[in-house]
Image: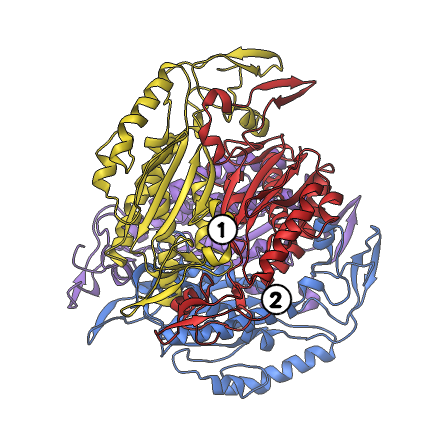
Chain colours: A red, B yellow, C purple, D blue
Amino acid sequence: MKDKYRPSHADFTYDAKYGTRAWHGGGRASARETIGRVAAAAVAKKILTSLYPEIEILAWVDSIKDMKADVDPATVTTETIESNIVRTGDPNAVDPMTALIKETRSAGNSVGGVVECVVRNAPAGLGNPVFGKLEASLAGAMLSIPATKGFEIGSGFQGTKLTGAEHNDSFYMEGEKVRTTTNHSGGVQGGISNGENIIFRTAFKPTATIMTEQDTVTTGSEDTKLKGRGRHDACVLPRAVPIVEAMAALVLCDHALQHRAQCGNQ
Amino acid sequence: MKDKYRPSHADFTYDAKYGTRAWHGGGRASARETIGRVAAAAVAKKILTSLYPEIEILAWVDSIKDMKADVDPATVTTETIESNIVRTGDPNAVDPMTALIKETRSAGNSVGGVVECVVRNAPAGLGNPVFGKLEASLAGAMLSIPATKGFEIGSGFQGTKLTGAEHNDSFYMEGEKVRTTTNHSGGVQGGISNGENIIFRTAFKPTATIMTEQDTVTTGSEDTKLKGRGRHDACVLPRAVPIVEAMAALVLCDHALQHRAQCGNQ
Amino acid sequence: MKDKYRPSHADFTYDAKYGTRAWHGGGRASARETIGRVAAAAVAKKILTSLYPEIEILAWVDSIKDMKADVDPATVTTETIESNIVRTGDPNAVDPMTALIKETRSAGNSVGGVVECVVRNAPAGLGNPVFGKLEASLAGAMLSIPATKGFEIGSGFQGTKLTGAEHNDSFYMEGEKVRTTTNHSGGVQGGISNGENIIFRTAFKPTATIMTEQDTVTTGSEDTKLKGRGRHDACVLPRAVPIVEAMAALVLCDHALQHRAQCGNQ
Amino acid sequence: MKDKYRPSHADFTYDAKYGTRAWHGGGRASARETIGRVAAAAVAKKILTSLYPEIEILAWVDSIKDMKADVDPATVTTETIESNIVRTGDPNAVDPMTALIKETRSAGNSVGGVVECVVRNAPAGLGNPVFGKLEASLAGAMLSIPATKGFEIGSGFQGTKLTGAEHNDSFYMEGEKVRTTTNHSGGVQGGISNGENIIFRTAFKPTATIMTEQDTVTTGSEDTKLKGRGRHDACVLPRAVPIVEAMAALVLCDHALQHRAQCGNQ
């Protein structure tokens, strides 16, 4: 490892930038650094709950490779998610997903997938019109998690295939409250939350470290081969769920405090 | 407009946050504010070129609704993109895309799509390991553009359907330079550019203002109907291309200056 | 002016940093840029007053050269300060200060002095313990005003000549409110306001541009002589008063919003 | 201590802001937190030295109470400063200052003073014209140190008593280098360093904790008396010297990196 760049790892880019790297354990490129984010989010969640007692932030594994779970963001519970080792919100997906990961590990290979996250009972008003849009903060936060390659909120990339007439979320009154009939917006309009569920998805690539021989180069600029060793997750998705929740809590807490600063207690 | 919230616009969220809104013209929610970003990017591009004379930033319309262009990010030119009104990089897509937009406008409807962007000849080393990852900066910047719902870099969401063996970018030597055989990483590994083309895609929802009657509510909390009026783009994608390029230039300029601060001239 | 560095101006340092400078008018080194601060402070004062209806921010000329005014920060009024051209808070100092400035101008020379500022009826609780201390924010803000050379809060430099027994501000109860018998602290203890008057002083050097010949060098590295021309204030102190007030308002507004974010409405 | 507010400490202001405080040891109000600054400055000094090999940052005790040292900032050495327990740069001041502190301690009282700091061999060009002036950064950094009440650079408050003709620093050529005959500017003109010695002074109030009975109030809003106990410095000045140096190093390192980002290696 000391002399070879692991493909699709941060080995080469660190060397290119700093002229040095921590080759055992991955150093700052290891997802172990996210423990600080999860710890901080425990505080952020306390602050959020003190401001918005009903707020809930839940993430779950929505897909692994091409295997998609069937989860309703409006009703999924932490109990369901935490009751299975894959941390998916769909009880029917647990066994096939578990089997897929085991097969993949046996083959010395790896898989990725998508984590979905919902924020329920956030108030309307969080976020800003131009600088500090709520969706921009969430996108930046999610892409700061190791191994992420994409972010989408509400209708996301699939929404680009709809027409405006299909995509627009009609407003209606539910008692005193302004609601929308659909939620293609994913709970955010113009940078600011609208009181509907905030829903977004984050793509995680397959784990870079695999137990199969790959082509690479040495730090001395020679072509070579490399085969992974040691304990590595064949699929990081289950471990990514609390990280996604943590980053969502930190972003929402920042915006909740900014909102209170600007608009007072609401 | 004064008394009715336009569906999927920022009307309601502004009112919810500030208790007031600029109802004619959209105020700060209008994409007109992006003119400042494009102006700033003209300066950013000068700085980038002074540091990296070969650097190029090009964006183009990659899809409109379900109509996908066929563009090679490695070879597409500004001349091709700017030679057609749709700003796509695929000459064969110009006529069908133009026809689709015209039909959509005639029907009083709207469409969205995806803008793709490539940064060519950026050096290895831009970005940071944990705070200020290059992909996180790009994601936050793209989701700050009005009407965006998604961001993906390199293999993105499709990459989650590959195995690690398929997804990893093998290294090889090209003369003195470390290169990768594939570019699923999209030019960024562990938060830092690796010298390959930086490639990312941004999803734009269909224009919210349509010339068709929709359900909505009044500022006085009553259900009502609303039909758009005035001059509105049935498809914002062609106009989004320079905004995506501008935000990419601003992000890369920030990172280039940070890199020079930390690592000197390289 | 184009080829000669004015002594104690920013001419040389701009050239040293940027290799270029705006030699007519002073460019960004001109105190004209502070108009934006004063404009912004008009908004900041509105926000402050909405949060703390009794708050008052007053600055005045406390000394010019070795001529010191006699002003009570607890009772001085805007009416007194704005009623005289020197903007001092001491009616008896107006004539001698005015005469001093006129004599100085006639002699082609210049003078500096000290502006004092009080914030009355600010609440206890503004500021932070380590990062973002209130006195640190004020010091940074005051030294950002052109021509400033010093800042002191409460007892300041003179306070270093007292013993702790003399300097400490004893607490006592005034009804429900905790008060101090003296105010050597200048209204701030441990980075946070204590509800007493916030009092600080800012030193302004004598105007650099004088109508007398001085030694200097050319941009071509030759020794030369230079004599000022044009319209220049022989004493900037009266014009500095609203700038000091403006920066104080901006700092307090920032801290008031931060305080509301963290601690709610109080 | 638990139920009484120590005069001129942060006890009351913490309670006023947070409704809670760490009453044993001072919590975040203890100058113990500055250990992190000194540690960070060790790194900052390495960076500064790598950029500017000749740069030197030295601070020393310039006065205690009304006892003033006689120190030449151009020639004072770390050896002199660190050779005596008071950390003054004037060998003749060591004994009287030491005696003064001992007497003060015996009397259960405390004293303050002034720390002076010089940065030698910094390049011309550090700092910015409006936002991020070098003197503003230094002022904010110094006033963030516990127990500080004032900051002045170059001629400072005394300089306000000079005329412009006396105060201006004439330029002359020393070989290829632009120099000034005097240094009332303290090495900074218009927010940017001019290559002369950067000289500034920071005022420290007498230690708040004294072994003498003082009037104060309880957390239950009753008047009471309080007498300090435990180990407390009768004079913090000697311990403040490395903190001043540390903050100066951090500010200069920030500005050096910003300067390299903007202007390249110079």
**Residue at image coords 32%, 27%:** B97
Which of A226/B139 is in front? A226
Instruction: Indicate left or right for A125 with B25 as reference.
Output: right
Q: Are marks 2 and 1 in contact (CB under 8 Å)?
A: no
Which mark is nearer the camera, 2 or 1? 1
Looking at the rendered structure, which numbered label has been put on residue B162? 1
Q: Amino acid at mark 1?
A: Leu
Looking at the rendered structure, which numbered label has been put on residue D172? none
**Residue at image coords 59%, 64%:** A232
Q: Amino acid at mark 2?
A: Lys
Looking at the rendered structure, which numbered label has been put on residue D205? 2
Q: CA distance from mark 2 to mark 1?
A: 66 Å
Dot 1: chain letter: B
The spot of residue A58 in percent (x, y) is 67, 43
Give the crowd class for mark 2: few <14, some 14-19, many >=20 residues within 10 Å. Answer: many
Image quadrant holding the C terminus of chain C, namely top right
**Residue at image coords 76%, 44%:** A79
Q: Secondary structure at mark 1?
A: loop
Residue A242 in view = no
Q: Is residue C19 above or below residue B244?
A: below
The spot of residue B215 in percent (x, y) is 55, 14
Dot 2: chain letter: D
